[in-house]
Amino acid sequence: MRNIRLLSLFAILLALVSCEKKEVVTTNYNVIPLPQEISLSENKPFALKQSTAIAYPKGNDKLKVNAEFLSGYIFETVGIKLAVKESDGGNNTIALKTGLNHGNEEAYRIDVSEKEIVIEGVSENGVFYGIQTLRKSLSPDYKGKEVHLPSGIISDYPRFGYRAALFDVGRYFFSTDFIKRYIDILALHNINYFHWHLTEDQGWRIEIKKYPKLTEIGSMRKETLVGHLKTKPHQFDGTPHGGFYTQEEIKDIVKYAQDRYITIIPEIDLPGHMLAALTAYPELGCTGGPYEVATKWGVFEDVLCMGKENTYQFLKDVFTEVLDLFPSEYIHIGGDECPKTRWQKCPHCQAMIKKLGLKGDGKRTAEQKLQSYSMAEVEKFLNSKGRRIIAWEEILDGGIADNPVVMSWLKEESGAEAAKQGYDVIMAPHKEVYIDYYQSEDKENEPLSIGGYIPLERVYRFEPVPAELTDEQKKHIIGTQVNLWTEYISKPDHAEYMLLPRLAAISEVQWSDPQKKDYGSFKNRLTGLFKFYDLYKYNAARHVFTQQ
């Protein structure tokens, strides 16, 4: 009898617990980057439940992957695992679809009703960005609660088709796991290009099978500068540093990025920043060496000898293997910070200058024109393979190549001038978007940096399109990016600290209508984004919450 009473009591308690309602929270769509248009209605909200399913069209493998991403995101934040099914949607579903009629390939529309949520994109890319908006609307604070999403329509598309972030692995090598983590961070911010800076004076990071010494020798330096380059006398740590990515690892990373609609643009920087390659193959230099993989930062006089035919063959061979790994339309070939000292005295370079009939004209030296010739030769080769080059703005110095994309970093005026000449331009001025610069004026309490000062608000207020351009010329500004150089950044947590939240600021510059930008609103919305930074244990800087 006593056992029956206990069982009855247990059943009653269980019934009471099961009948207990979860706390109801109603989300909002105040995310970063801010959507172009949010139109809410007075209709009843959509209630997210354990029984809600995510639907994708039959046979669409890309949307199936998108659906699985969304299911994972919702589990991370709300704590419920939604089933993914092949169907057209319907009651109590989040339906993913393509076919939206819009002129922007990355556009999407989210239609929220009491019955269902429909995320429709022009393409699978657009659906993915709609998923990111929905994801960021579901705060990690909602775990264990019943989440209601307000009825209405979100219509959204990016301002720029090129939205990028650079990461430099030449100065310091970073693991494949961190590169994937970096890509995850980019995806959270609607970034669609990852500019991967793979070669430097201080290390060659990509396996090239025809030239094994590039990684056997060029990927390792004997030691590294301690402290700032400007601090004399220089001191070194005495510890070898190196590493490189095998071709199989690169293929895996490229696929990882593709699944998140991020295209990786590899950079093989030439003809300067090539000491690591020269150390491996000294015959590619003007003096023949010996050379040493750089152990400190800066610009070095030893560069590729562009007077030797074997140098051009070397570059074609390297890029042939690079193209097999990276399907990107764009290939970055550098072109910056190339001193001409060696070329001025090199018999091979001078013979090439004479052969080509290059002469200084008061504006440009013969050696500058030799660089333009060499960049144009690489461009022709890449064009013949269906690719298009990006190069730093110094490509303008000796007369521009055929049809490059100019990456303006020194002076915004250079980008404006290139656009006036009809060239496509990516704006990345160092005074606005070089996020290896300090983000606080309290430099004594900040990690050592190369210098400068670029706070969050400065990045947010950056306008990539020069006002002086005509409407037609403005079309040549195809986008912008932040650049994270790593001379003074050797650890992943430091990289994240410099990246976040300044990446959030540039993401709104890249995506949202500039007329709707408001720094106060951005700061308020950043509070919600930081909940995701904390969820994923991203080491974001928090100056925005402490500075007046």
Image (cartoon, rainbow, N blue to C red):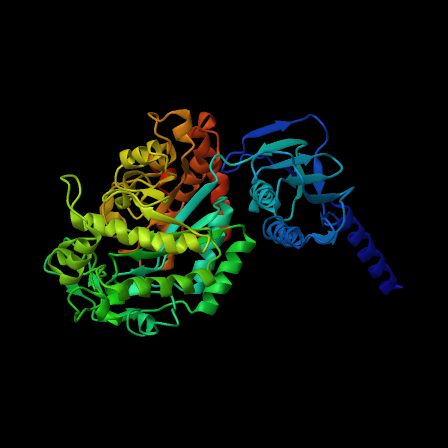
Q: In the picture, residue 364 is in which quadrant?
A: top left
Identify the image quadrant of the N terminus: bottom right
Counting from the top left corner in percent of width and height, residue 166 is at 38, 50
Q: Is residue 16 left or right of residue 462?
A: right
Relative depth, front residue between 212 and 61? 212
The residue at 50%/44% (across/down) is 190
Where is 45 relative to 287, above or below? Answer: above
Relative depth, front residue between 147 and 316? 316
Relative depth, front residue between 87 and 369? 369
Counting from the top left corner in percent of width and height, residue 292 is at 20, 69
Counting from the top left corner in percent of width and height, residue 481 is at 39, 43
Q: Is residue 47 left or right of residue 525?
A: right
Q: In the picture, residue 474 is in which quadrant?
A: top left
Where is 340 relative to 243, above or below? Answer: above
Identify the image quadrant of the C terminus: top left
Whether residue 170 can be seen here: no
Residue farthest toward the right in the current orientation of the protein:
1
Counting from the top left corner in percent of width and height, residue 482 is at 37, 44
Q: Is residue 400 left or right of residue 180?
A: left
The residue at 21%/48% (across/down) is 369
The residue at 43%/34% (across/down) is 523
